[in-house]
Amino acid sequence: MEVDLATAQAQRLMCINGINALVTQSSRPLHLEARVISGWGRRYLKLIENVDQLLLMLNTLTLHRVITEQELGVRVKQCKRDLIGIVRAVRKSANSLREQAGKTREQTEKQRLDAPR
């Protein structure tokens, strides 16, 4: 699912139904300071923030009975599945790179040991 497209659709539904404000959380949100040291990490964090905003919109639409609880559940599951898929793909890629680096290191060490002195 494309988060931007889903967010645009949710915004459109809110406008069509005259909904101007998002629901508020009854509990205080968790605030933690985290330093992001890579571009990928920054983009992933932004994606999580966008999904969080989308989920607030979907909850608002559900409370106003624009979408059903069942549709909310389907969309929430899709968002979670997409985020987890990204994490799995990144982890798989990182593991592959580590494996390739290890093989290269082993080949270099073998060549160094086999070289005539």
Image (cartoon, grey):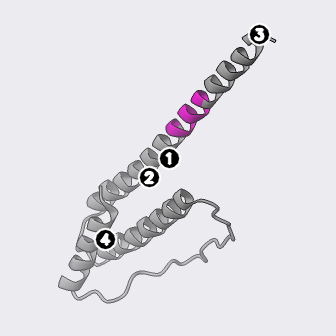
C-alpha span from label 4 to label 2:
15 Å
Find disc 2 in the rendering and name its residue: 83
Point 25% across, 65% down: residue: 68
Find disc 3 in the rendering and name its residue: 116
C-alpha span from label 1 to label 2:
6 Å
Measuring from the top left, give residue 62's x and y in whole percent. 31, 71
Q: Which amino acid lies under the numbered mark 2 shown in the image of this protein? A: Leu
Closer to viewer: mark 4 or mark 1: 1
Tag 1 and tag 2, C-beta contact below 8 Å: yes
SS of the residue under disc 2 = helix
Most foreground residue, 3 or 23: 3
N-term-proximal mark, 3 vs 2:
2
SS of the residue under disc 4 = helix
Point 59% across, 74% down: residue: 29
C-alpha span from label 4 to label 1:
21 Å
Tag 4 and tag 1, C-beta contact below 8 Å: no
Point 39% across, 50% down: residue: 82
Most foreground residue, 97 or 2: 97
Find disc 1 in the rendering and name its residue: 87
The stretch in magenta equals 92-100
Above or below, 112 relative to 32: above
Above or below, 110 relative to 61: above
Image quadrant for the N terminus?
bottom left
Tag 3 and tag 2, C-beta contact below 8 Å: no
Let me know if residue 19 is in the magenta part.
no
Q: Is residue 77 left or right of residue 18?
A: right
Type of secondary structure dominating the magenta stretch: helix
Measuring from the top left, give residue 94's x and y in whole percent. 56, 39
Let me know if residue 94 is in the magenta part.
yes
